[in-house]
Amino acid sequence: MFEVSLDIAAMLIAAAFAAGFIDSIAGGGGLITLPALMLAGASPVQALSTNKVQGCFGAATAALSYARAGHVNMRSQMGSAAIAFGASCLGALAVSWLPTDALRYGLPVILIAIALFFALKPGLSDQDRVARVTPAVFAATVVPFVGFYDGLLGPGAGAFYMIGFVMVAGYGVLKATAHTKLLNFASNIGSLAIFAMQGAPWWAIGLAMGAAQIAGARIGSRLAMRVGARIIKPLLVITSSALALRLIWQLW
């Protein structure tokens, strides 16, 4: 039934549950699932595309959870989500001709900078601040940039959306987390559409992992809404740092 043996499938499903929990709070779930898929024998393209299959379920679940609790109006985000979808499609199409290896060298530096920002910047809380740009400008600049990156490489996209909402849009930490999820879902769907046309994903294991993502995302989003910045900030610092260290290890 699965593309892997049952014991490996169980390991991947457990990894997806943990990833759904972490991703719904601070992003970075791919830090868990991508290496797990590679260890299971997936090629880089298979791992990336299967990760998009299962990641869509977690992002959608978290987005709905935050919306039902009143932390985000998804209708107002539909335009930005459409932009994220289109940009991620372009990113996935560009995988074969852009120098992604060169981009990977700079990514750990950016992730460490994100971790330091949330660890050291005073005054970061669930309270909104003054926005530096209008929502239209945010949708025309930050959203397509991160969406394109999500289709091209993927790791850390949730953290990039998050820091954009905090630094540029002026959102509080919990509100930024809530608004990140629909965009993350849209950019996952966009890049998945391109990979699916190439026949790359492991569909059976990806859907099974998606079910585990739903469970993890429900628990994680509820915890985030209960505790807010007190849990989101430390988890964001940990996941960004861990992803940076993993990328450095892969490079060297």
Image (cartoon, grey):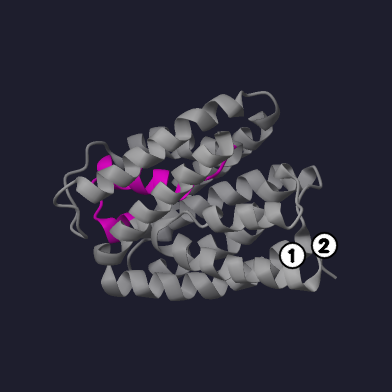
Reply above or below: 122 against 97.
Answer: below
Where, quadrant-wise, is the N terminus in this rendering?
bottom right
Which numbered disc, 1 or 2, marks the residue that appears first in the sequence? 2
Residue sitting at x 46%, y 29%: 106
Residue 48 at x, y percent in the picture: 66, 47
Picture quadrant of residue 6? bottom right
Amino acid type of the residue that numbered disc 1 sits on in the rendered structure: Ile
Residue tagged by mark 2?
A: 3
Residue tagged by mark 1?
A: 205
Q: Is residue 202 magenta?
A: no
- Given residues 136 and 97, the one toward you in this image is 97
Residue sitting at x 55%, y 33%: 252
Neighbor class of circle 2 (other Cα within 10 Å; few <14, some 14-19, many 20+) is: some
Left-right relation of 252 to 6: left
Picture quadrant of residue 76? bottom left
Amino acid type of the residue that numbered disc 2 sits on in the rendered structure: Glu
Left-right relation of 185 to 229: right
Q: Which residues are magenta?
A: 153-176
- Given residues 199 and 4, the one toward you in this image is 4
Neighbor class of circle 1 (other Cα within 10 Å; few <14, some 14-19, many 20+) is: many
CA distance for labels 1 and 2: 7 Å
Residue 134 at x, y percent in the picture: 28, 38
- Given residues 71 and 26, the one toward you in this image is 26
